[in-house]
Image: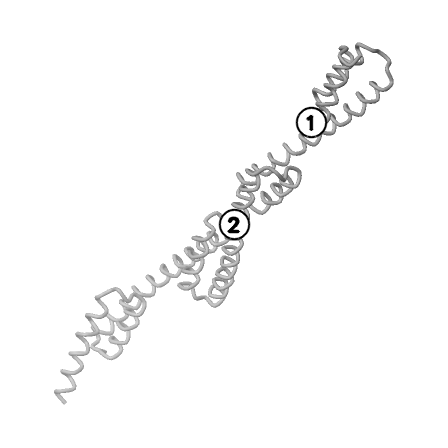
Amino acid sequence: DASTPLRTAWNQGDDFLAAKDYNNAVQRYQAALTLKPGDKAIKTKLSSTQALLDKQKKDQQAYNDIILAAEKAVAAKNTQQAVIYYEKAAAINPENVVLGNILITLRDQLSVEQNLDKDFKAIIAKADVYMHDNNLTEAKKAYEQARSIKPEDKYPQDKLLEIGKIEAITEAENNKKYKETLILAESLLSQEDYQSAYQSFSKASTLHPKESYPKQKMSELTAKMKELEAQY
């Protein structure tokens, strides 16, 4: 009886079951049941093994879904979420060395990202204070620094655009004032009101420090006023 096809199929089923190869175990128990239809022991073994196979398939599908979600999180650069998913996968499959290595890399990456995020928030807070105080030069530097840390973040980009608009308006107003001040300075100069003309050219130079013309006129006026002083 030990070598009959029925006993062989049964024993093979038990071997596959012990190896957790539920798919082949089910096939062997089905073969045994075909040889001895209606056998309660075979039916019970087949039913319990089929339940194990169903659970194994369900667990495998759940595991595959977790791995897929983890890979999507990595692709979306959501490292924190990726770590959570890979930790779930590692809990299901703790002996998987590849998963362990991925987790080590991702945890290191997450630590770096969290430190950068901390720096980013501190720089943004500083930039916002500069912005509130209307210190556009320092605000611009800080927002640019924040943008270099997180190029994809819209907030520093939006603030830099806002500063750019303010600077454009300020420059236009300065240009208008500069021209008006020069016209006044030239008018005062033509009236030989040298002191007032000097003050107007000085104001124009403050509005446009890089322009050489107001400085040149100030120098000429200084010499002219000294010359007039020397006459008295």
Q: Residue at x 44, y 55 (%)?
A: 160
Residue at the limit of the structure toward the bottom, as seen here: 232
Vertical order, 73 against 1 (above or below) = below
The image's mark for residue 203 is none
In the image, what residue occupies the spot 40% across and 58% down?
169
Amino acid type, mark 2: Asp
Q: Residue 155 at x, y = what percent?
A: 50, 53
Q: Residues within 10 Å of mark 1 (few under 14, many from 20)?
A: few
Which one is in front, 224 or 78? 78
Residue drawn at the location 39% of the way across and 59% of the way down: 167
Q: Position of residue 184 (x, y in %)?
A: 28, 70
**Quadrant of res 68:** top right
Which residue in the protein does label 2 denote? Answer: 108
Q: Is residue 117 left or right of residue 141?
A: right
> Picture coordinates of residue 27 (x, y %)?
73, 17
In this view, 139 is above or below 10? below
Q: Label 1 is placed on what type of residue?
A: Ala
User: What element does badge 2 sit on?
Assistant: helix
User: Which residue has dot 1 on it?
Assistant: 19
> What is the count of numbered marks?
2
Q: CA distance from mark 2 to mark 1?
A: 37 Å
Q: Residue furthest front?
A: 2
Q: Residue at x 31, y 70 (%)?
A: 206
**Color theme of the render:** one colour
